[in-house]
Image: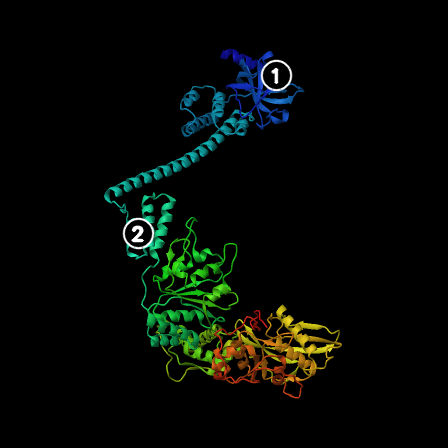
Amino acid sequence: MMKQQKKTTKKREKQGPTVLPVLPLRDVVVYPSMVFPVLVGRESSLRAAAEALSRDKYILLVAQMNPGVDEPGQEDVFMDGTVAKIIQMLRLPNGLMKILVEGEHQGRVQRFLNNDEFLEAEVQVIKQATPDDRKMQALLRQTSELFQEYIRLNRGLPQEMLVSFESLDDIARKLYFVAANIITKVESKQAILEIHNLDDQYLELVRLLHEEIEVLKLEQEIDTKVSDTIHKSQRQFLIQEQIRALQTELEEDGEGSPELAKLAEAIRTAKMPKEVEERAWEELDKLRRTPMMSPEFAVNRNYLEWLTAVPWSHRTEDHLSISHVRQVLDEDHYGLERPKERILEHIAVLNLVKDMRGQILCLSGPPGVGKTSLAKSIARALGRKYVRVSLGGVRDEAEIRGHRRTYIGSMPGKIVQSMKRAGVVNPVMLLDEIDKMSADFRGDPSSAMLEVLDPEQNASFNDHYLEVDYDLSQVLFITTANVLYNIPLPLQDRMEIIELNGYLEHDKVEIAKRHIIPKQLEEHGLADQAIAFTDAAIMKVIHEYTAEAGVRSLEREIASLCRKIAKGIVEKKGEEPTAAAPKKAGRKPRATQPSVTVTPEVVESYLKVPRYRNRIGEKEDMIGAATGLAWTSVGGDTLTVEVSLVPGMEKLTLTGQLGDVMKESVSAAVTYIRANAGALGVPEDFYKGKDIHLHVPEGAIPKDGPSAGITMATAVISAAAQRPVRSDVAMTGEITLRGRILPIGGLTEKLLAARRVNIQTVIIPAGNMKDLADIPDRVKEGLEIVPVETLQEAIPHVFRNASMPVAVADSSVANTVASNPKKSPKTSPKGSSKKGGTVGRNRRGNGAAA
């Protein structure tokens, strides 16, 4: 049979190009010397096979480029293929045909013939010489070694295939045998057919074997890792189950694990309420029955750790000596009499009842006045633990109440976390910046704070994570805020609000001398140096290098002076210090002749050009200019309202970046003056052919609020009547269309601002008289405070010339009220009114209200 086949092959090789039917194959490449069954089903393929059977049974087998094409054309098949002979044919009942073909030669399509029934082409049979040299022997040896490695790594190929490979004598047949049994892409197998030189075919086969062996090694490595992981997990599970079984045998409660035993001991010693302890034992029993590899195990364990970590009964003893508490508060803070008095009242009540609930204080005031440090001092004076919770920027309710355990990474809220840090049930908890909370789609944290800060509810505060009631009634809550209008009214109603006003200049001087300067000298290694600050130098820093209600910037500037003094001392010695002097609490500078005395000249030489101009009042009376009082976020200030009447179209022009409320106040004031011009001593046609231009200086700073109404009205009257306004008078109050002056807020800060610029007389709304009782005497000292109910009542005090006709409405309020608080009526503790707007201008560039 082999001899006959070789004769036929040699005869066909001599014939040259031969016309043969073409049979496209899907996902398979047939090589010479390869017997392969083919299931023929397409109509064109059936006709091609039938044509080959009717001739000499030879057919060209080519692979499709895209196996998804159902009826491939000339452009859908590769040009190189295998000339094969059909050795068997079987027609199936369903119309299909099954043929068995044997590949004989490589063939290449020269051109396709026009045949509408099936593919037919002129085929060139590839002639290959069989080289017999050392290179081919080397290639054959390497192929054999690689094929053995490939079969060893590929579990899908039997080892007997090596025996079949070694039994082949023909070099070409060995090549085709290996190529046919490699599991790879059709394109890679087709590449061998497209090479017509046996040496190059072997090189391509060796490259292909190397690639496939690398892939098989990677697959085997991945399988090994996965298998090891699975076996390890199974082994751990079996060991854990065995340990659990042993624990059950040894201990009836199943707490053989040190971890579970530790949790059980924590539950026994926590002294929880009965309901909470029952819940803890239930969770521990559930944890004991949960496999350690289960995610629920870690969740339940973390829950029990939190439940046992928060304090349930441990508390600290309060220092109930009023003298001791007073001493500590006075040591840490100068002034702040009202909050100190409130704490002393709290101590007095504790001495009588031993247990007092519902202590929730809100310290409200501008930045730097000592709200946060005062809370620390209160904790130190009472002997309680101190914890601070920052609420600035909190916008998620879960940060207060905690996350439910269903969420991954859930944990309790800030309140329970702080109680764990404190370790006692009665700490002083500072809720800092409570006015900086905001709400979004995740909830409103201020609503969650309602339960925390309600004395009637916080005894059973329920955190979403703990899911049990927790008693917060023994906590002394202290909150801080810069402004109250950002706090919801229901939340304000639950707190006792204590307002901390800005410091006066002499207060800042005392604070600097008692606290700031000793602290900064200690921190900069100057405690042993004889350094003295004069009062004038401190006042210069306060006036020209700071603009604040508190003392934060003052401390920074004094620290800057200390650094420069330290630099000068070191340079004078000519060497750097080798070691800093050890710090000793409470150390004072030596009482010797000062080596460095800080004077105003030294301050200016160190701090250079002043950052702020020292604001002074107007030196002379001016027409069309009135002085108002303003409230800003850093304390009180003064502002000048300027009015000018110029020829025009009777327009009202407002400049100085005024807000909508302030613009409405100007309109109301002008309308009232026009309606009552005669009674106010103003020409009734003062606005005829005139434009009224009202300007508030420092136009880069926004200003808003209604309380500059009286000031703007006075300036308009002055410009219209051409009468100068007294430069030593300042005023504040909201004006209505009927000329009434309504109460305002921020009175203390405004009086401080008046004192700062040497104002002698301050005109305020009569409705604010009740607030004077709460204002310290040193703020009112030297001020003549005049309450008025209408604009007409204010005019005699505003203009020096009393000849101006004035119609004064009947009023029960006296023309002038002295600053003695004993003569002032009692007032409520809140120094502001709902109607009182805030007026102001901030030299730092922040928004101001007028």
Residue 537 appearing in the image: no
**Front in this rendered view, residue 326 or 594:** 326
Looking at the picture, which amino acid does disc 1 mark? Answer: Arg
As drawn, which residue projects farthest toward the left? 250
For image coordinates 68% across by 81% down, the residue present is 719
Dot placed on the residue nearer the N-terminal end, 1 or 2: 1
Q: Residues within 10 Å of mark 1 (few under 14, many from 20)?
A: some
Question: In the image, is residue 687 above or below residue 442?
Answer: below
For image coordinates 45% across by 55% down, the residue present is 398
Secondary structure beneath dot 1 equals: helix
The answer to whether the residues at label 1 and label 2 have Cβ atoms under 8 Å apart is no
Looking at the picture, which amino acid does disc 2 mark? Answer: Leu
Task: Read off the residue under disc 2.
Answer: 263
Q: Nearer the viewer, mark 1 or mark 2?
A: 2
**Front in this rendered view, residue 639 or 541:** 639
697 left or right, relative to 385 = right
Task: Read off the residue under disc 1.
Answer: 47
Q: Position of residue 849 (x, y in %)?
A: 58, 71
